[in-house]
Amino acid sequence: MNHLFDEMVDLFRAELQLCNLKPTETMAVLTSGETRADYAKAFLKAASQIGANAYELKLPPANRGMAGSFGITPITDNRVAVECLKKADLVIDLVLLLFSKEQLELQNEGVRILMVVEPFDVIKRMFPKESDKQRVLYATELLKNAKELRFTNQAGTDVQYQLGQYPVLVEYGFADQPGKWDHLPSCFAATSGNDGGVEGIVVMDKGDIFFPFNRYIQDPVSLTIKDGFVTKIEGGFDAMLMREYIESFHDPRAYAISHIGWGLNDRAQWHSLALDNQVFGMDGRAFYGNVLFSLGPNSELGGTNDTPCHLDLPMKNCTLYLDGKLIVKDGDIVIDEMKPVTPEQV
Ligand code: FE2
């Protein structure tokens, strides 16, 4: 076996330990075709080293409608596969079950799910630390207790979210509790505004990120928001792309405001997308001090909007308040409990 594979096994074993995989448990790896076959192999070996049972469930690719659509996965309408995964304690998802009803079904059964789709160098650099969990849980408590979130930026953003209706999405990079879903790597917390409870204007600035286009915004894009929905998208070329993409779904629910939160991964790099456009994009999404603004579904947080059109729009240099209390100032976290833990503090 080559050096890279050994390194992968070592890192995935450390991840499985963070996921609290016990020798008495069973881990499943969900794969499709040959995609990330090296990850599957390395996770199986790592699980064996821990002494856990493990199996790979390999399925044909999903019959996805539109490129970039979420929610249609290789286990959609495959009941035997879903039942098979329910028997596992931990599922390593290499196929992107995100926003599918089957993922929620597995979580409700107490299955822990870890999504792994980023290139190995990104995983390695952004690999979770035990201390990330405490920092993300601190952010989670702040979001849970807040009634209102407001964020601004120099480009003209000023938007308010009424909070309280929806739970908090907690991502610290490992799935260590029954029913917990997480993503390797991540490190942020987010929630959704109450139904109809988002008002204002968001102006994405040059250099902010437009997922799933994996693109830096070239000119400001201005989104007018009323009663929780985008009513106008104005600007230049990027605004046109965004309008056309959303329109192509022919779904009014695609204009809804989705999750909102801020990133806490200090190993994330904003420029990584310029180096590799094929990444899933956790660098931008979990970037320390960003505001992760998004459009589309809220089904992941228990809402009824399950539109397949989902835009994640990480924004840099924003200022964010919860109930008037400053949390992020010009892209920097101002609360000590959420700042990175230095080696001396470990
Ligand atoms: Fe998202």
Image (spheres, rainbow, N blue to C red):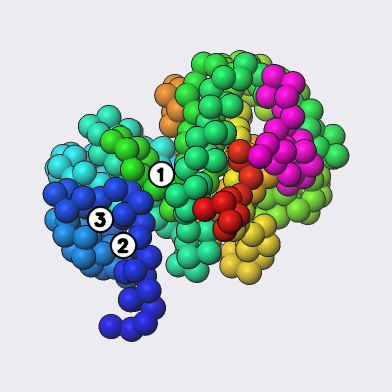
Residue 13 tag number: 2
The one nearer the camera, 283 or 331, is 331
Which residue is the site of mark 3? 29
Q: What whole-number distance in Å separates the C-alpha atoms at marks 1 and 2? A: 16 Å
Amino acid of disc 3? Val
Horizontally, residue 197 falls left or right of residue 331, namely left
Q: What whole-number distance in Å separates the C-alpha atoms at marks 1 and 3? A: 15 Å
Q: Is residue 239 above or below residue 229?
A: below
Which residue is the site of mark 1? 182
Return the residue found at the far front.
344
Q: Earlier in the sequence, mark 1 or mark 3?
A: 3
Callout 2: SS? helix
Residue 277 image-quadrant placement: bottom right
Callout 3: SS? strand
Amino acid of disc 1? Asp
- Read off the magenta span: 316-336
